[in-house]
Image (spheres, rainbow, N blue to C red):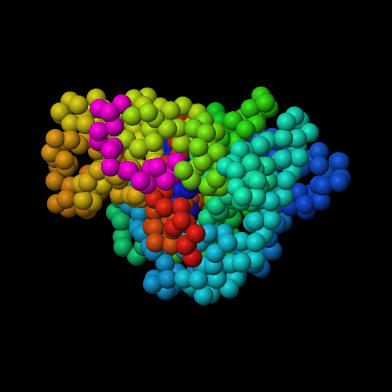
Amino acid sequence: MKLASLQLLLTPASIVLCAVSPDEKVWEPPRLDYRDLVSATGHDSLVNDAERTIHDALLTGNGILSITKAIPRSEKADLYDAMIHCAMSPETAKEIIYPDGTKRVTWAASSSGSVNKCEELSKVADPVRKQVGEVMSHLALLIEASLTKMGRAPFFPAASTGAGLEGYSLHELFSRGEQLDHFHVYSNAETSYSNKAELKTIDWHTDYGFALAFLPGHILSQDSASAQKYTPSKGFFIQLPDGSAQEVTFTEEDDVVIMLGDGVAHIKNAIEDHQDFNLRAVPHAFVMPDSQDALRMWYGRMMLFPLDAIHSTLHQTFGAIQKSLNADPSYHLSSKQEGLTGYPLGCSSPQALSPRLLADETMDCESDQFMCWHTCFNNTEELSPEGCASKNLELACVNTVNGTLWDGINHCSACEPTCFSAAEGARTDGVAESAANVTNEVAESAANATNAPSITPEADEVTSPTSSETAETTSTTMPTSSSAGTCNGQQSFAVVIAISMLLLVV
């Protein structure tokens, strides 16, 4: 739910992991016909039906809603054709290979920018991108109207400008916030992975931003007799409010799926008068199909807060907070001694402005979790404050490639919780000696701790906002844990290095 992840304006993804039983029942998302969404204005019966569906799905329900009949199949097919064409030219995109052998290539752009790294994709993507914007605009207007009828209209304060702007309506929050688009093509790498089957467990996470709008993943059909060139992909799972894991069944009618992300914590504060609402970031995971020839296409848009919007608890703009983080990311090691005041960037409870790398009770994750690279990792017997302390080490967020500490801001897809020697300033197990060995070691440690190996994460689905240089490669494979939980459903926001870079995404 991986702008690939770039994350936006701001917030860390919560990670919860568990194995999915093969006999879990399939789950279908609540659906709303796009024509009803557009036609609702002025038609009380349609308004009531549409509002009820949105209310039950997004405002009080599971946090996911599918909009049907919004994008012509021919436009989606053209988009997928172009993505496959571009994937054949490695120089146009960044690619990574996950531990289970899945390869992903990515192109990224701000919603107002062009995907000009591949001309073929740039030509056909605009109609689909425009329609996704229309869907989100109509959805925001209807939610705003519904909330207004039920009580006070939601209002999101903003810094005053020359034009006298003092705040955003919900619709303006959607339309004026930064929006990041990602296009992913997944395939099974040619290299044979003997442990591929062992890696097919679920890697749960929630996405950055307050919402993600995406086209369900589609697979290129290998059946020449099939009437459909592309068919909805299987392997997308969500975690329901009761903690159960369900595979989601998408159909050809599911055109744009809206799924809530970590940023809903701020929206909750703005609509606190509506006591019956329960906005929920949706934990989700992804399993790549086994077929050696499988090609899976996915497109999504991350919705972020405007830079001049006022943080709901800090009373500063998101831009100012981001600027403060960028100005001095160096005091992460001394923050505990200096007793710095925490800055809650995404949750209602305190979170340090300077992301702290050493385990600390002020981290805005559960008591049995540890924050690393904007993510809440579940502690294991080996990787926990107590486990590391037993070795006279400290739990830290470490780059598994070069053994350095995460600086708290830069994207670090190789960063993972690790027992670290603060005195020596480096990992004690020779991480710099061999990146491959370290990666395997971390994966094996997690697998041994839970008897459930990790799989390809759905960073697909964006786990953070990205620039043209980083968006395409930002994604992580997280260690697994048998315990399931989220950071109270309100993830702390972690800010990207330079928001200005987001405007350069092409």
Residue 477: image x %, image y %? 36, 47
Residue 506: image x %, image y %? 49, 65
Q: Is residue 216 visible?
A: no
Count of numbered tags:
0
Q: Is residue 301 visible?
A: yes
Question: Does 366 appear above or below 134?
Answer: above
Q: Quadrant of residue 246?
A: top right
Q: Quadrant of residue 97?
A: bottom left
- The residues colored magenta run 321-339
Residue 85 part of the magenta-drawn span: no
Name the residue located 55 percent from the left edge and 45 percent from the top edge: 308
Residue 47: image x %, image y %? 81, 42
Q: Is residue 126 left or right of residue 188?
A: right
Q: Is residue 310 left or right of residue 443?
A: right
Residue 351: image x %, image y %? 41, 31
> Looking at the image, which is closer to me, 454 or 150?
150
Name the residue located 42 percent from the left edge and 38 percent from the top edge: 15
Name the residue located 25 percent from the left edge and 33 percent from the top edge: 334
Q: Is residue 351 left or right of residue 391?
A: right
Residue 331 part of the magenta-drawn span: yes
> Looking at the image, which is closer to me, 232 or 25?
232
> Looking at the image, which is closer to me, 447 or 341?
341
Most extreme residue toward the front is 162
Name the residue located 39 percent from the left edge and 50 percent from the top edge: 497
Q: Main secondary structure of the magenta part?
A: helix
